[in-house]
Amino acid sequence: MIGFLRSWCEGITISIFVTIIIEMLVPTGNIKKYVRVIIGIYIVFVILNPIVSNIKNIDIDEFLSATNIEKEEVFSNNRRNIRNIY
């Protein structure tokens, strides 16, 4: 886990250094704001990459079956409560 966090932080740090260098090389003007937008999107992707890769490991069918069971329990409890009230 520590190695994963360390490599993630190193990736973020390297991407920030690269973006700073690119931003210094781009001349001022209209193109600079577009380059900043692209750099911002790149940094967001670098930050979110581990989260997206972990989402792929989640079994969706297992999650949906668990939520269906919970919904059925909630509905049956609600029906019982409504009958008790009336």
Image (cartoon, rainbow, N blue to C red):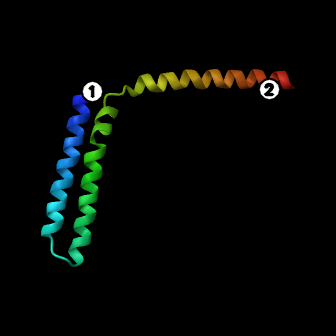
Where does label 2 land, which residue? 82
The residue mark sitting in front, 1 or 2, is 1
C-alpha gap between disc 1 and disc 2? 48 Å
Q: Residue furthest right?
A: 86
Q: Secondary structure at mark 2?
A: helix
Q: Are marks 1 and 2 in contact (CB under 8 Å)?
A: no
Q: Amino acid at mark 1?
A: Met
Q: At 20% across and 36% down in the image, what residue appears?
A: 7
Reply above or below: 16 against 81.
below
What is the quadrant of residue 27 in the picture?
bottom left
Q: Position of residue 75 (x, y in %)?
A: 67, 25
Q: Nearer the viewer, residue 84 or 19?
A: 19
Q: Taking 59 as reference, is 72 left or right?
A: right
Q: Position of residue 76 (x, y in %)?
A: 69, 21
Q: Amino acid at mark 2?
A: Ile
Q: At 85% across and 25% down in the image, what residue appears?
A: 85
Q: Position of residue 9 (x, y in %)?
A: 24, 41
The N terminus is located in which quarter? top left
